[in-house]
Amino acid sequence: MAGHSKWKQIKRAKGVADVKRSQVFTKLGREITVATKQGGPDPDGNPRLRLAIDRAREQNMPKDNIERAIVRGSGEGGGETLDEVMYEGYGPGGIAVLVQTLTDNRNRTVSDVRNAFVKAGGNLGESGSVSWQFETRGVIALETNGADAEELALRAIDTGADDVHVDADTIEVYTKPEQLESVRRALTEAGIGVASAEITPVPKSTIELDARQAEQALRLLDRLDELDDVQRVASNAEFPEEVLAAYA
């Protein structure tokens, strides 16, 4: 899954450079609001909220924005009602794509998602059509900071991680969803830099794409990522290194 994982790493590195900062803050605020609504306003007792706040801080979201999102989720600020909806589809080369959304208008969101698939030569599928090809896992991206990658990987396993993927410039640690927070905390306490941590669908296997298909797939994933209602996009695409290098 190195190709897809590297796409995720590149997206994190590019951050808000390709997207309006206000749009990024809107998405992060929605995630904080829903996490608060589901698990309460205390991040110490609400792992999903803790992760959402951490992601917001990674993007330099102002503290006031974070606090307002928590207030909305606590029911004190009124505002929109958000539904969590997962869309599934097929992209270039037959890749499977999962699109996680938070929306206050399902008709608008499904129309936007469908159009993104159609423009890329793909199609939106039925519920359950591709989700079986993924499993939900905790994924932690580590900062190497010049340290030996293999040593960091072994230390990550010692904290309770299930698996670690190492390539030339990235380390990704995989956990059970319920163990993500404890592993993240253990890594931080051990002095290992955590670039990001999230619970996300991870493909069980990947599909290798040629250069043309890879470029089309990257455009699809970007179109989906840039939709206001989309929180997270996952695919089982395996991208050629030279295409990713050009994309980066």
Image (cartoon, rainbow, N blue to C red):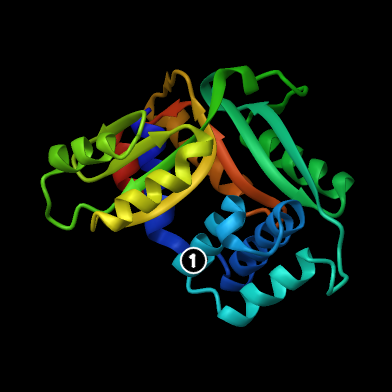
Considering only vertical position in the picture, is 224 above or below 69?
above
Rendered residue at 73%/41% (across/down): 113
Rendered residue at 38%/53% (across/down): 185
Rendered residue at 50%/60% (across/down): 55
Residue 115, given in percent of the width and then of the height, sits at 74, 40
Rendered residue at 33%/40% (across/down): 172
Q: Nearer the viewer, residue 62 or 67?
A: 67
Secondary structure of the residue carrying tag 1 is helix
Query: In which quadrant of the rendered image does the N terminus lie?
Result: top left
Residue 104, given in percent of the width and then of the height, sits at 85, 55
Task: Give the labeled residue for mark 1.
Answer: 16
Q: Quadrant of residue 24?
A: bottom right
Drawn side of residue 161 relative to residue 104, left or right: left
Can residue 80 be seen here? The reply is yes
Q: Nearer the viewer, residue 203 or 114?
A: 203
Which residue sits furthest front? 45
Amino acid bearing label 1 = Val
